[in-house]
Image (cartoon, rainbow, N blue to C red):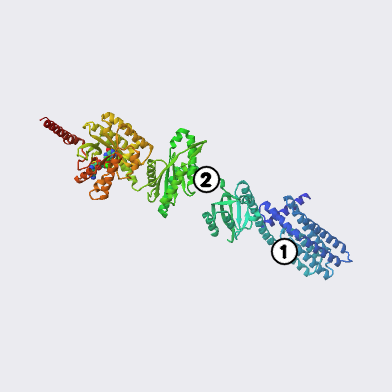
Amino acid sequence: MNRILAILVGWAQAVDRRIDDGIGAGGLAPHVRKALMRQQLASIAQMTPALFVSGLVVTLCFALLTWGQKELAPTVLCGLLINALYLYGVQRTRRPAPQSDNRIVAAAVWTMVSCMVQGALWGIMLNILPVDGSLAIQSAAIVGVGGLLCITMTAVVNYPQAMLAFAGPLVVGAMLSLAEVTGEAASWIQVPMILGVAIGMFIVSLRHAAEFVAHRASETQVAEKREIIALLLREFEQTTSDWIWGFDEQGRINRISAGFNTATGVSEAALTGAGFVHFLRALTVPDDPLMAHLEADIAARQSFRDIELRVIADGRECWWTLTGKPAFDESGWYLGYIGTGSDVTERRTAERRITILAHHDPLTGLLNRTKFVDQLSQCVGRLERYGAPFTLLVLNLDQFRQVNERHGHQAGDRLLEHVARRIEGSVRATDLAARIGGDEFAVILPGVGVAESVAMIAERLIAAINQPFVVDGQALQIGTSIGIALAPMDGQRPDLIQRNADIALARAKADGRSGYRFFESGLDMLATERRQQEAQLRDAIDQGELVLHYQPLVSAVDGEPTGFEALLRWNHKTRGLVCPADFIPLAEQSGLIVEIGDWSIAQACLAAADWPAHLSVAVNLSSRHFRRSDIAMVIKRALSISGIAPERLEIEVTEGLLMENSDGVAEKLAEIHALGVTIALDDFGSGYASLGYLLRYPIGKIKIDRSFVAASNVDAVARDTLKAIALMGKTLKLKITAEGVETREQAELLSDMAYHQLQGFYFARPIEPVDLPHYLLTHVLARTHAAKAEVEETLAALRA
Ligand code: C2E
Ligand code: CA
Ligand code: CA
């Protein structure tokens, strides 16, 4: 018995497999097959109520047909059994669909058994019915059973195994019932008919099931894929800080992950349906080129990758990168975009910090030298491309070294920080301030090329830095000098512009503290030339190329020499005899004037020591020399070394010196006067000719400027001036000298005006030291001898 059952089960399984293969369910993965089977069973279960109703109707009809006959009871019994099965089936459909594999198999077995039992019961019913009786019963049986067959087969059409289980016993039953109606040829005809219909139905069921399987399998697979994708996406969101976004073909956001909500601070409900591009535009700055790039890509339905946008989200500045891809369905229909995004603010901030460190001076936070050079090149680039002018200011702090020495380097550092803040405060945010050296700063003013505006900014910077600083509770005072170069005027190459600003700075420094200087064209050439000349002049002093020539001063009364004025000459190797006007300014600028002036005084005194004692010597003093040298000390030494009487020495100063009106000048003049040395005011009348100076300072002599003498021939005003000055001299008890006397008329005029001394080419040109003894011999000693002879002659005459 068991063996038979095993054979039957094995047989049933073989059939099941064959049918599965036939409908294309054989090759499916077991879990897909199970899912499919569940759907097959469900489609049958759906039909069970209809089967129940129709089964009940057919049973009732058969009961009526057999009413009062012996067949009534078995017919009704079969009908009730069938309907009980249907009812049970209806009952089962109310339960939740089976999920576990075992329950699916159990449900399948039950369906098969139920179908088989139904088929068998209907088959039995056909045999019970008195079909050999009336034609009415015969046709009722055919319609009833045939109809049920159709309904049942329709119900199980998706599950050919169930169809077979139902149809098998029913067909057998039908055959048996036909066998009862023996002899009638028409009845035998029904056999192939029944078989044909059953086989046809089975084939239809196979085709139908195959389609069902194909459809459902692909549906299952799609659902499965979707599930996997959802799973992966969920995983992606949980493991990374990135988010997912998507929008439909209209550009409306239709997919948003929680990360995106957090990033934007906008709820999912508010975001869903909003225009994606519109939303982003509201977060980014207007005209962001990258936003435009993104919009263009979306408009062209192109993929984009890692577009980095600066956004203001949730009230703070953030950086997002967005990657997106257009989506299309199988037919190529555009569905919108799907993409990812992430917040890269932290990375950007870190990058920015690194850039700041690389481009800024760590102490002051201003641009460092490297970045400054880079910016300068960029300005030159803009100058070349658009002709945009700009200005470079270089600042060097005055007395910063002293602060470092006196208060320590820490205080120096603090001070530099304060200076940087003041520089920043004095210029616009678009200007570029840099620290390019220890106490050297630079400011680039892009777009500024007008000297007046630059001068205003330079003055503002100087004023700001001149204000005292408070560092560690101490007030510190420094200043700054500024050199300015305007581009393109002062250069069109970064190195040239910087060099010229440096030259201007050196000039500003040389001029004294807290000033600014513009670079002057050709200044650099002059500067080099000047440096060379300076070196030459220094050599000249060392090698004794400087010499003094001596021009006689004569008495206006008798033309007898009363002394000499020492006039400086440079006996240059190649240039020959160079006039003082050509090198005194250089000596003054370089400071060599002190050395030269001191030497002239000493040299003139030494020379005078060889002359007859009644002859004086006059030395010209430059204001710079006077201010910088301890002049009284120098004179004292010169007098003592040469041994000449102080009264023989005259110092010629100009009005320029007196105009300075400072205590130092007055004191020094007083000291010189106290030594017994005469102070002469040279070139009188060429300047202010102020009477005040003559009263305030110990002036012993005035030398009227030679221009008056020169003009006296033709100009009555000049003559009046000469006369007025002579009168003033007499009133103030000053010696009056006229220089530049070139003619006899001038000499006579001046003599008539009671001038004391005269000087000029009419009497003598400046004399070289080698020629001096001869002059002295012929003009001084000879006359002295002549006077001696005259006296002797007179004495002899008296004696006689
Ligand atoms: P200064 O003090 O007015 O000197 C007189 C200048 O007049 C001299 O020129 C002299 O040669 C010139 N001179 C004399 N007589 C006549 C004349 O009849 N006609 C004309 N046209 N010129 C006459 P020099 O030697 O070229 O000196 C020019 C200036 O250089 C001097 O003007 C003086 O200011 C300055 N200087 C000369 N020697 C020295 C010096 O040792 N030290 C300083 N600091 N300055 C000096
Ligand atoms: Ca003079
Ligand atoms: Ca003079």
Q: 313 or 333: nearer the eye?
A: 313
Vertical order, 19 against 683 (above or below) = below
Res. 604 image quadrant: top left
- Can see residue 580? no
Label 2 C-beta lies within 8 Å of the nearest ligand 1 atom: no
Would residue 340 appear left or right of 178 to someone viewing this image? left
Local SS, label 2: helix
Identity of the residue drawn at 77% across and 67% down: 188
Would residue 317 appear left or right of 570 to someone viewing this image? right
- Residue 197 percent location from the top left of the image: 73, 65
- Residue 214 percent location from the top left of the image: 66, 58
Label 1 C-beta lies within 8 Å of the nearest ligand 1 atom: no
- Whichever of callouts 1 and 2 sits on the residue coming sooner in the sequence is 1
Vertical order, 145 against 689 (above or below) = below
Q: 654 or 748: nearer the eye?
A: 748
Res. 749 image quadrant: top left
- Residue 142 percent location from the top left of the image: 79, 67
- Can see residue 44? yes
Q: 308 or 185: nearer the eye?
A: 308
Would residue 513 appear left or right of 179 to someone viewing this image? left
In the image, which disc is placed on residue 201? 1
In the image, which disc is placed on residue 425? none
Q: If the picture is divided into quarters, which one holds ligand 2?
A: top left
In the image, which disc is placed on residue 352? 2
- Residue 449 percent location from the top left of the image: 41, 51
Could you tell me how far apart the alpha carbons at marks 1 and 2 are, in whole angstroms? 78 Å
Q: Amino acid at mark 2?
A: Arg
Instruction: Report the number of numbered marks.
Output: 2
Q: 10 Å neighbourhood of mark 1: few (<14), some, or many (≥20)?
A: many
Local SS, label 1: helix
